[in-house]
Amino acid sequence: MTHASSSREGLGSRAQVPARVSVIVNPLAGDGRTGRALPEVEAALAQRQLAYHVETTSSLEHAGELARDALAAGETAVAFGGDGLIGAVADALKYTDGILGVLPGGRGNDFARMLRIPLHPGAACEVLSSGVIRSLDLGQVGSKTFVGIASCGFDSDANRIANETRIVRGTFVYAYGALRALAGWRPATFRVVIDGGEPRTVTGYSVAAANSQVFGGGMFLAPEASLQDGLLDVVTISDMPRLRFLRLLPTVFKGEHVRHRVVEVRRATRLEISADRPFTMYADGEPVGELPLTVRPLPGAVRTLVPAG
């Protein structure tokens, strides 16, 4: 099976894609929607005459092991779940000849959204049979790899609340987490060092290192970020009254918040960040470490199947 495109993987390659795929699935992702959608995915793969087998994950670490098994067997490792699962599979494949396939099955599905992969998992199977390969950047916090956006501060509280709640489902959980976090929020002071330069102090809401444009179920926090530029977009949100912040939140879904004077975006190959109180950094919806931390991009780290054109 070959995929016609340009001669460079940066743009979309003509490359041999393994004829067999290993579907690495978290059946509990997306509040159980992934498990319920698995029969439809299997039918879509069979319809496209793709040889496959299904491997169920017990953890993100286990997902990485399954991805390495797929690599050793010469198979495409297909992550079927949320962005955390995709990040774990991408981490196992980074800087290898392995190929990452993506079937969205989480609550946010922001990596698929960024790549314009259909958000319906059955329809997304088409990319596995007709897509092209692109070498995409990853981000790294310590030893943890991520595909989307790593953030801390207000985002730490909102992510924790979203992950803990059982009363709100789907993408609404991120709005719920943000509103709950805002009620008890007090400004934090962050110390930010970009590319080894002079330390900068930011007092306010959050600091984020964006490999991708979007997180939180469709919030375009870094609307100009690219998965192929070898850089992170560092987004800082300084202090403002809570009511003004509440009004700013809906504009993030269109990326219009960057016009606000308290929002700053800078590009970096290395971000060092600390704060005046403890914060957990989250990436792809998962906790990845406690401040202080260093974040950096991994340029062209993972070969990924994306829609042709």
Image: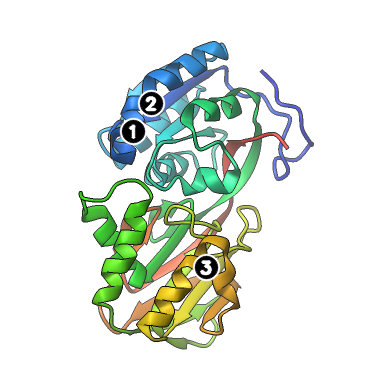
Q: Alpha-carbon distance for marks 3 and 1?
A: 28 Å
Up-down relation of residue 140 to residue 263 (above or below) = above
* Quadrant containing the C terminus in the rendered view: top right
- Hey, what amino acid is under mark 2? Ala
* Dots 3, 1 in contact, CB < 8 A: no
Task: Return the residue nearer the eye: 167 or 230.
Answer: 167
Q: In the rendered image, which residue does mark 3 sit on?
A: 251
Does residue 14 appear to the left or right of 267 in the view shown?
A: right
In the rendered structure, find residue 33 and report the number of the disc placed on it: 1
Q: In the rendered image, which residue does mark 2 sit on?
A: 37
Front of the two marks 3 and 1: 3
Does residue 152 appear to the left or right of 74 in the view shown?
A: left
User: Residue at 37% of width from left, 37% of height from top?
Assistant: 64
* Quadrant containing the N terminus in the rendered view: top right
Secondary-structure class at tag 1:
helix
Q: Few, some or many C-alpha atoms within 10 Å of disc 3 (few <14, some 14-19, many ≥20)? A: some
Q: Earlier in the sequence, mark 3 or mark 1?
A: 1
User: Residue at 38% of width from left, 54% of height from top?
Assistant: 144
* Dots 1, 2 in contact, CB < 8 A: yes
Front of the two marks 3 and 2: 3
User: Residue 14, percent across and down?
Assistant: 73, 30
Does residue 51 appear in this view?
no
Q: Quadrant of residue 80?
A: top left
